[in-house]
Image (cartoon, rainbow, N blue to C red):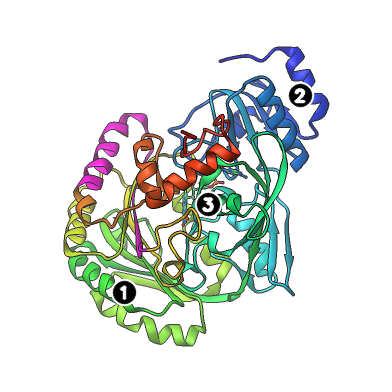
Amino acid sequence: MKQLQKAMIDEFKAHFRGDALLPGDAGYNEVRQIWNAMIDRKPSLIARCASPEDVVQAVKFARKHNLLVSIRGGGHNIAGNAVCDDGLMIDLSRMKSVQVDPNTRRATVEPGCTLADFDAAAQAHGLATPLGINSTTGVAGLTLGGGFGWLSRKYGMTVDNLLSAEVVTADGSQVRASETENADLFWGLRGGGGNFGIVTSFEFQLHPVGPNVLSGLIVFPFVQAKSVLTKFASFTETMPDDLNIWMVTRKAPPLPFLPENVHGKEIVVLALCYAGDPAEGEKLIKPLRGFGTAHGEHIGVQPYTAWQQAFDPLLTRGARNYWKSHNFSRLSDGAIDAIIEYASTLPSPQCEIFIGTIGGQTTRIAPDAMAYSSRDANYVMNVHGRWESAAEDKRCIAWAREFFAKSQPFASGGAYINFLTQDETDRIAFAYGAMYNRLVGLKKKYDPTNFFRMNQNIKPV
Ligand SMILES: Cc1cc2nc3c(=O)[nH]c(=O)nc-3n(C[C@H](O)[C@H](O)[C@H](O)COP(=O)(O)OP(=O)(O)OC[C@H]3O[C@@H](n4cnc5c(N)ncnc54)[C@H](O)[C@@H]3O)c2cc1C
């Protein structure tokens, strides 16, 4: 590992208010470890920023000494770009304030917040904005890649609800980006990932949600997968925006509402959330129970914040993970058959294939309105390879790649940048589609030397 000279570190500490962690320091290993245990990198210095001014200092220091920089928000990204070998890891996870103005229904959120931090503060006023489905995910990375979750059919992608951002650019300047200030930068931030600068504050539009929502799971036997998936595909094409239903197929965890003899067996799960009046939702979800003969269900009216955490126990950090993803405008028979074929050969008890349903409001925005442009994606499929030991790497990765190839002919194009792994740099231009050239032009303007390159990198050439 490259060691920094003592004089350099002293120079850095003189201007930095947060914690500067070196290899061997208490906390160094904890901060450099991210959600995906496949990634094991050792930065020469970790700058745990306490303020936007600290971020400026870190950027200027890295520029002066020509250090590779990585940026950590929630540390959840599968590709692991939050941490680098040798260079400077700029860790934002201590910057956690959330300010909610219930009158304007706006929130100002610092980049170290998790979804749980943001949801808790907004729900204190009965408000929320669309975020993801695992509450330990970082708001920053999720937003900069697009962001979708239970509320997206009703209120759009997370980026559709971003009103402005405070940004530290590659030359260390602090700028504001919105529809009226540095509008080109604002366009690029909404989907362009960490390519254009470090966001030190996000301003979001909030909406009335809950605080209690009808939500939960229905679990079907895997032998009924064809019928359940076919009915799911057709039902989700016309359901109202208030309702969202995702499909997961995996081996059954030991959920208390499932008979014990089902635990460990393949199942098909429909997970749902209704963002309107629960009584209306009850009527709407009735047909789902007829999709098959369920093993069991666990559906009720519960706090939105509790539903946002429902999947956390299955998505804890520290496991080895490898993902592959496609967008679909519709789930054809071919796609359904491929899902069933590969779900019947799951290589580990934690591997799963999920279909996140979006559509609704996410499709009503012009594709060139911002860098995130997959407005024809009604479903985002993720092959979630997850396992415990390095000995299983080859088998589990091969399974994910094979299924990805098999389902590719049925995909609609584009890809969700936040689900790309580190070996998919060849899919970045494909993911952005027609927006890619415009993003390259923006990169040339805001980061001509590719100072921010630990990301799904848009090269300035
Ligand atoms: C278990 C799990 C569930 C998920 N579920 C969903 C979901 O439901 N919906 C969804 O949309 N996504 C989901 N995701 C994907 C998630 O959106 C991405 O992993 C996202 O990148 C996580 O953000 P982070 O801040 O935690 O990541 P980090 O790894 O900290 O950051 C990812 C990258 O974003 C950039 N970045 C981070 N912070 C900043 C900043 N302040 N300024 C500039 N660049 C920055 C950097 O390039 C960094 O490498 C899920 C991920 C996991 C692991």
Q: Which residue is mark 3?
A: 142
Check the image and report above or below for 207 versus 100. Answer: below
Question: Percent position (x, y) of residue 24?
Answer: 65, 20
Where the N terminus falls, by quadrant? top right
Nearest the eye: 305 or 194: 194
Instruction: Please give left or right for residue 173 compared with residue 239 in the image.
Output: right
SS at circle 1: helix
**Residue farthest to the right, as pictured:** 14
Specify the amino acid type for callout 3.
Answer: Leu
**Disc 1: which residue:** 237
Where does residue 336 sit, x and y in percent of width and height? 21, 61
Q: CA distance from mark 2 to mark 3?
A: 30 Å
Identified by mark 2, the residue type is Phe
Residue 158, position in %: x, y?
A: 54, 61
* Ligand 1 is within 8 Å of the C-beta of the residue at disc 1: no
- Counting residues from the N terminus, which is met first, the one under dot 1 or under dot 3? 3
Question: How far is mark 1 from mark 3, CA to CA?
Answer: 25 Å
Residue 160 as seen in the image, left or right of residue 109: left
- Asked whether 378 falls inside the magenta stretch, the response is yes
Q: CA distance from mark 2 to mark 1?
A: 55 Å
Q: Which mark is residue 12?
A: 2
The amino acid marked with disc number 1 is: Glu
Which region is colored magenta? 376-405
Residue drawn at x 54%, y 63% as measured from the top left = 160
Alpha-carbon neighbours of circle 2 within 10 Å: few (<14), some, or many (≥20)? some
Residue at x 42% of width, y 46% of height? 436
Characterize the local packing of mark 1: few (<14), some (14-19) or many (20 or more) Cα atoms within 10 angstroms.
Answer: some
> Could you tell me which secondary element the residue under label 2 belongs to?
helix
* Few, some or many residues within 10 Å of mark 3 (<14, 14–19, 20+): many
Q: Secondary structure at mark 3?
A: helix
Mark 3 C-beta to ligand 1 under 8 Å: yes
Residue 374: % across, % down:
39, 58
